[in-house]
Image (spheres, grey):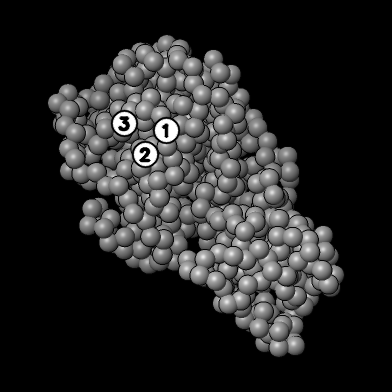
Amino acid sequence: MLHRMRWVALLCVGVVVTLVALTNAGAAPPTNCDTQVNDTQAKLLPCIQQKDLWGYMQKLQAIADANPGPDGHPSRNSGEPGYKASADYVASVMKAAGYDVTLQEYTFPYYAYTSTPSFSEVSPTAHTYGLGSEWNPGQSTGTASAAIQPAGGIVLPPTASPSSASGCSASDFNGFVPGRIALIQRGTCFFGVKVLNAQAAGASGVVIFNEGNPGRTGLLNGSLNDAAGNPIIPTIPVAFTSFDTGLALYNEYQQGTPPVMSLSIQALVDLNRSDWNVIADSPGGDKNHTVVVDAHLDAIYGAGMLDNGSGSVTILDIARMMKNVNPTNHLRFIWFGGEELGLLGSAAYVDSLSSSELSHIGYDLDADVTATPNYIIGVLDPAAPDFFGGTVSNTFPNRVYKASTIARDEAVAYFDSIGKNHEFLSPTGTDAISFNQVGIPASGLLTGQDCCKSQHEVDLFGGSLGNYEGNVPSFDGGCVDNPFRWCDNLSNNDPTVLTFMSKAFASMVVQMAFDTKVMSASNNTVVSKKLPIAGETSRHFTAK
């Protein structure tokens, strides 16, 4: 269970105008939502309706069903037909609503499983390891059937703090028998460095086990990066295991009977696959003062209806309901690709802008998961703890932080008005961080995914201990971000949560569309776009 300490804010930020506007938010929608100018919360929020939101969700699910990925399951993953069909659908809706729409293309290294990976011990003890419970596949491809041989540098018993550098040096493979599967302990260097050294020594596969120090004992799941931190896709299969599994294999080898293993990871690899961001600009508004409203459209391991079909339809419905608005500030709605692979789409977008173009973006609002059944209510705040890990990993100058609190506090006021608690969360792992990192204020909303909801959060938001979504109450990790489950479908979403979260997000959008105090500073020079953005290849995999 991930243990996360959160900064929970229960302060009432009552804004009289806001609360007056929201008193009608739950009323029946006016009959003229499609034709009226929804330029205030009082007009806009009643027009955000569950039937419209759910209709968009059904369309995205249908797109996934009609476009299976290489594994044969419904998919909207980046680089696959289901994602492109999703992008084309969003673009068509926005064009019909009168927005100026472009598809921004970028490329990325594509990887997809074509069958379910397998890992087993053939002898002396026959055992098939459970996928996701006893082992995890690294992003690699190939088949190996051979005896295990430990690499040098393994530290047993483990020390109180990390100290192993196993596999980090070519000398750790002196005497390695080519063709064998290398057994390597976690520690010190990037996992990809260990694998590259093993491959150079002639290994047919690699098993990396957790180091065994406190906090480094359980089943491991890692990203494969080279010494410079760049992702690699080895052509030999890589398995990650717990410390106990690695220790058992190590002991068998030391007892004189090297265990014979079978490891197979079959995948499709394309190092230059196209992907797209959908960018839709409002006809009006001052382009020198632009508000970006974003969600990521891509999925991972399937249909991706919670993460992030839900956020995508949130901003799609808001954009459609604001089609007749002539905002003070220019509105740019963006559906990013590649978020699940390391914020690729938002990084590509930010990197494509000149310093002058960046300086005209005064704010970003991000909707990343808005329909979780066993929900929390997270409001993005640059200084708050990370969703995964619970530590505060970001520091930003006051001109970024203070402005970010404007939309943040608007969301708080809305949730206060409907009697719901909230907690502040870092934008780390969301596309909003790509804007914060170049000096642009940002906020947003999320309702949580994966495992695990704490008792403290149950006390705040109701629901059950365990998964935020999927099979609750339980602690099996949920549907989102977990391969080989294929369960992030419509049934993994709560339409009631989607509706009130979309109304909350709409209150933030319409506020920033007409803001003059914060946005008047948005033509100031921002920091260099050469700042590092999104170095991880997955937002909660370990790197070392």
Where, by quadrant of the figure, is residue 237 drawn? bottom right
Distance of label 2 from label 3 (alpha carbons):
10 Å
Frontmost of labels 3 and 1 is 1
Residue 34 point in image, percent of width and height? 34, 23
Q: Determine which of the numbered discs, if any, sits on residue 262 in the image.
A: none
**Residue 91, can we see it?**
no
Q: How many marks?
A: 3
Amino acid at dot 1: Phe
Residue ID for mark 1: 396
| Mark 1 secondary-structure assignment | loop
Given contact means CB atoms under 8 Å apart, are the residues at marks 2 and 3 in contact?
no
Q: Is residue 166 left or right of residue 163?
A: right
Looking at this view, is 531 or 434 the one in front?
A: 531
* Amino acid type at mark 2: Ala
Q: Is residue 336 visible in the rendered structure shown here? A: yes
Query: Can you give x and y, in whole percent of width and height, for residue 219 in the image?
Result: 54, 68
Looking at marks 3 and 1 on the same chain, the residue that comes earlier in the sequence is marked by 1
Q: Residues within 10 Å of mark 2 (few under 14, many from 20)?
A: some
Left of 292 or right of it: where is 513? Answer: left
Q: Which residue is found at the position 53% from the left and 17% from the top?
A: 357
Disc 3 designates what residue?
405
- CB-based contact (under 8 Å), mark 1 and mark 2: yes
SS at badge 2: loop
Discs 3, 1 touching: Cβ within 8 Å? no
Q: Position of residue 475 (x, y in %)?
A: 40, 66
- In this rendering, is residue 196 above or below 15? below
Residue under pointer 2: 383
Q: CA distance from mark 1 to mark 2?
A: 8 Å
Q: Nearer the viewer, mark 2 or mark 3?
A: 2
